[in-house]
Image (cartoon, rainbow, N blue to C red):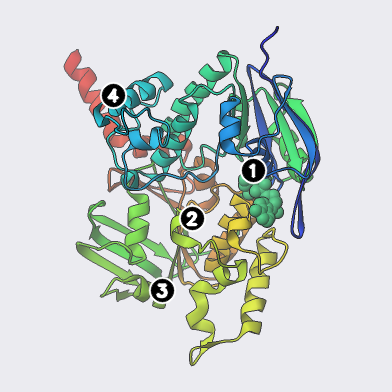
């Protein structure tokens, strides 16, 4: 008998109250191939993977794995049959080690006892075998992991028992370029071993790097499946959104106004001696590799990290108490990086989440007019094209990208004078990206000082008037829009590393 692990799903249909998430979708993931699964936010990608995984039961359709019926009723059934889905939002047990997280609930115990030492040794071996040893320490504790490490841990955990079909749901959204390279090395090996791989991403570049074919969904329907060879980015965008997005990064020229945000030698536990300015009507990007300290700096500006020394000024006035309350009061808004943990109250509604930051502003004597809330929420839903049946939908039921739009909507509605956006387009589809760029541009034009953190260089170059580059908790340089290139930004982002390599090569000579 021929061993084939192709996964074939036909006629998959799934409705949620008010939404038809999938409508008679046919897809197949072939052995020895990477199939990119693409589509706008809310197109149905994650729902499809959750159905394959047995998280959800389809309303209709059939699934076969290696020719056999494979309608799983739970993820553990799917796992036993050799299928793993790596979820969009990693779930890491916070107070146990990486090793324990890797084998959660499936490490052999001797008479009820698990040997920590053996487990750590096995974890180290598995990390080595899968190629992630340099990025994850088996002894590290869950809560101390960065978003990137948490994502990698989720991936490693899924790969340990050699699944035949592996589905990645936006695995790279919180990874740096180097980590992506490591992951792609791993995916390449899995493909060469004949595994069938499905890969969801909004990054077109990655699709060309890693995928053999592309399957596109739109509004819960299959648009088509094509070989990547011979396709252009425009072809895929056209399939996804049905329109041309050639001027993604349009900026309206505007003269910067007075300085709104000024940092003078700001030092926190993680960043040192940061001095920078953002003027009204200006967009400044903070570039750097993951771990350079950008998020820490953003949190400090928002009053969420203690500032050990240095000054923080908003509109020429020094911020004294440096608490989140004071920052908000002074008009500083932060759309944080980890939307799930920090920004969204998942069980509350879309409307509640959007109006959260501005409750103060619209409340009179502690009263918030429900009508006013509704108007404001409706405005943002419309503006950002947030896909939700009603504003009363719980945020946890939205697709990942639409959750991100809710976070942004909150800050856009808040009338902040200084807006710090940490990876604002992470997980957002190309159409919505273009829309978010346009909104950020409008906000700047209206007088807001915008500081954007982004790991996507095309985004940094397209959006910013100035680019400040960080490495290891310090700024390493600044580039104007006119002089900036990807190479120059990268050179500054790795300035220290390059110096050490230069020194090393001198020493070895
Ligand atoms: N548990 C649920 N309850 C209600 N609606 C849901 C639920 N899960 C998904 N949906 C809806 O189904 C649709 C498809 O969502 P899905 O998460 O599959 O999109 P996606 O293609 O993965 O988008 P993204 O790129 O934003 O992650 C969306 O309209 C979403 O709001
Ligand atoms: Mg999704």
Above or below for 20 versus 502: below
Q: Residues within 10 Å of mark 2 (few under 14, many from 20)?
A: some
Which residue does the numbered mark 3 point to in the structure image? 328
Which type of secondary structure does the marked residue at label 3 adopt? Answer: helix
Residue at image location 76% in from the left, 56% down from the top: 19
Q: Earlier in the sequence, mark 1 or mark 3?
A: 1
Which residue does the numbered mark 4 point to in the structure image? 121
Question: Is the CB atom of the residue marked by disc 2 within 8 angstroms of ligand 1's nearest atom?
Answer: no
Residue at image location 62% in from the left, 43% down from the top: 55
Q: Earlier in the sequence, mark 4 or mark 1?
A: 1
Between 381 and 98, the one nearer to me in the picture: 98
Which residue does the numbered mark 1 point to in the structure image? 46
Q: Answer yes or no: do the residues labelled 4 and 1 have beta carbons within 8 Å?
A: no
Cα separation, mark 3 vs mark 4, equals 47 Å
Cα separation, mark 4 vs mark 1, equals 34 Å
Question: Is the CB atom of the residue marked by disc 3 within 8 angstroms of ligand 1's nearest atom?
Answer: no
Q: Nearer the viewer, mark 4 or mark 1?
A: 4
Residue 487 relative to residue 244: left or right:
left
Residue 465 location (% of width, % of height): 48, 54
Cα separation, mark 2 vs mark 4, equals 32 Å
Q: Nearer the viewer, mark 2 or mark 4?
A: 4
Q: Earlier in the sequence, mark 2 or mark 3?
A: 3
Which type of secondary structure does the marked residue at label 4 adopt? Answer: helix
Between 28 and 104, the one nearer to me in the picture: 104
Residue 482 location (% of width, % of height): 49, 46
Which residue does the numbered mark 2 point to in the structure image? 340
Q: Earlier in the sequence, mark 3 or mark 4?
A: 4
Q: Answer yes or no: do the residues labelled 1 and 3 have beta carbons within 8 Å?
A: no
Cα separation, mark 2 vs mark 3, equals 20 Å
Q: Answer yes or no: do the residues labelled 2 and 4 have beta carbons within 8 Å?
A: no
């Amino acid at each position: 008998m021929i061993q084939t692990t192709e996964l074939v799903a036909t006629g998959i249909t799934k409705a949620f109250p008010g939404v038809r998430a999938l409508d008679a979708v046919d897809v197949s993931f072939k052995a020895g191939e990477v199939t990119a699964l693409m589509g706008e936010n809310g197109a149905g990608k994650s729902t499809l993977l959750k159905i394959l995984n047995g998280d959800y039961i389809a309303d209709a359709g059939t699934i076969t794995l290696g020719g056999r019926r494979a309608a799983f009723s739970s993820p553990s059934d799917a796992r036993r049959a050799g299928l793993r889905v790596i979820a969009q939002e990693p779930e890491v047990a916070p107070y146990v080690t990486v090793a324990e997280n890797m084998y959660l609930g499936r490490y052999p115990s001797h008479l009820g006892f698990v040997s920590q030492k053996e487990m750590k040794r096995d974890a180290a071996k598995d990390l080595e075998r899968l190629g992630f040893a340099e990025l994850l320490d088996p002894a590290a504790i869950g809560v101390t992991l960065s978003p990137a490490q948490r994502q990698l841990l989720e991936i490693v955990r899924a790969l340990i028992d050699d699944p035949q079909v592996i589905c990645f749901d936006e695995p790279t959204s919180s990874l740096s370029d180097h980590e992506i390279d490591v992951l792609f090395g791993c995916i390449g090996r899995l493909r060469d071993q004949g595994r069938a791989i499905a890969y969801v991403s909004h990054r077109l570049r990655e699709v060309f790097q890693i995928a053999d074919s592309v399957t596109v969904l739109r509004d819960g329907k299959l648009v088509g499946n094509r070989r990547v060879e011979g396709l252009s980015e425009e072809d895929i965008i056209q399939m996804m959104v049905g329109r041309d997005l050639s001027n993604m990064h349009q900026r309206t020229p505007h003269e910067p106004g007075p300085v709104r945000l000024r940092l003078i030698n700001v030092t926190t536990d993680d960043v040192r001696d940061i001095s920078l300015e953002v003027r009204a009507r200006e967009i400044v990007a903070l570039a750097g590799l993951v771990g350079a300290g950008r998020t820490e700096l953003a949190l400090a500006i928002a009053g969420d990290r203690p500032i050990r020394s240095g000054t923080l000024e908003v509109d020429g006035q020094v911020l004294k108490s440096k608490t989140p309350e004071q920052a908000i009061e002074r008009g500083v808004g932060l759309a944080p990086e980890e939307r799930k943990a920090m920004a969204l109250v998942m069980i509350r509604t879309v409307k509640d989440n959007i109006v959260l930051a501005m409750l103060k502003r619209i409340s009179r004597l502690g009263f918030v007019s429900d009508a006013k809330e509704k108007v404001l929420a409706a405005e943002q839903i419309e503006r950002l094209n947030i896909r939700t049946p009603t504003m009363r939908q719980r945020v946890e039921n939205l697709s990942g990208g639409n959750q991100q739009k809710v976070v942004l909507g909150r800050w856009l509605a808040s009338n902040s004078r200084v807006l710090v956006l940490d990876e604002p387009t992470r997980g957002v589809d190309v159409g919505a990206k273009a829309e978010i760029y346009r909104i950020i541009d409008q906000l700047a034009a209206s007088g807001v000082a915008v500081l954007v953190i982004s790991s996507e260089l095309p985004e940094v170059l397209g959006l910013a008037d100035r680019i400040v580059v960080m490495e290891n908790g310090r700024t390493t340089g600044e580039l104007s829009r006119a002089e900036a290139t990807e190479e120059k930004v990268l050179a500054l982002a790795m300035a220290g590393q390059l110096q050490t390599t230069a020194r090393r090569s001198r020493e070895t000579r």
